[in-house]
Image (cartoon, grey):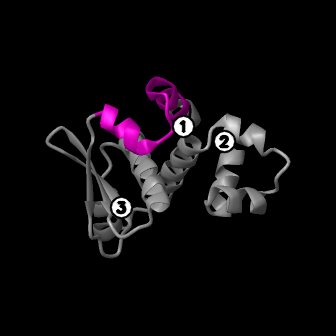
Amino acid sequence: MAIKKKADELARKFQTRNPFEIIRGLNVILLFVPLIDTRAFYQYFKRNNIIYIDENLPRHEQMFECAHEMGHMFLHKKANAIFMDTRTGFNTSRFEKEADTFAIDLLVGDDILAEYQSYDIEQFSRLLGYEQRLINLRLNSH
């Protein structure tokens, strides 16, 4: 399934692009905890989807991290990226880029792109509060 299509499908189904509201509707367990050396992570444990987010992040960043971890949940459910990163030589950068793409596709709808189409990437980045690399991902998603 195309990443943008899945993000748009969820936004339509739950009538929001707020990842906290969407995961509530999906019965995902969301935990705000103090994390060291990571901002958030996703775990599939005993048939439960669990998202952990650093409680010390600003709310805007928590929303992005939640959407990013949702990307892992939908795109990489069986992949244990933390294990692969720390215990193997497997390169997980593709998984991270896909999760970033899902997050920015979910958070920034086509209506926002249309409304600010005259803005350049730097202006768009400042307006929305997301890094320029994420804005580039969104502008290039199909």
Foreground mark, 1 or 3? Answer: 3
Of the residues under marks 2 and 3, which one precedes in the sequence? 3
- Image mark for residue 40: 3
| Residue 70 percent coordinates (x, y) | 40, 45
Looking at the image, do the residues carrying marks 1 and 3 touch, with CB atoms under 8 Å apart?
A: no
Foreground mark, 2 or 3? Answer: 3
- What quarter of the picture does the C terminus occupy? top right
- Residue drawn at point x = 33 percent, y = 58 percent: 41
Q: Label 2 belongs to which residue?
A: 141
Looking at the image, do the residues carrying marks 1 and 2 touch, with CB atoms under 8 Å apart?
A: yes
Q: Residues within 10 Å of mark 2 (few under 14, many from 20)?
A: some
**Residue 112 is a magenta residue:** no
- Secondary structure under tag 2 reads loop
| Residue 74 percent coordinates (x, y) | 39, 38
Q: Residues within 10 Å of mark 1 (few under 14, many from 20)?
A: many
Q: Residues within 10 Å of mark 3 (few under 14, many from 20)?
A: many
Question: For the magenta stretch, what is the residue range?
Answer: 7-26
**Residue 9 is a magenta residue:** yes
Q: Gap in Å between the C-alphas at discs 1 and 2? A: 8 Å
- Residue drawn at point x = 32 percent, y = 65 percent: 55
Query: Measured along the vertical axis of the image, is residue 43 above or below residue 24?
Result: below
Furthest residue in direction top, as rendered: 13
Query: Measured along the vertical axis of the image, is residue 26 above or below residue 123?
Result: above
Looking at numbered disc 1 in the image, what kind of residue is underneath it?
A: Ile
Looking at numbered disc 2 in the image, what kind of residue is underneath it?
A: Ser
- Secondary structure under tag 1 reads helix
Residue 133 in view (yes/no) = yes
Q: Indicate left or right for 114 with 86 as reference.
A: right
- Image mark for residue 3: 1
Residue 92 in view (yes/no) = no
Looking at numbered disc 3 in the image, what kind of residue is underneath it?
A: Ala
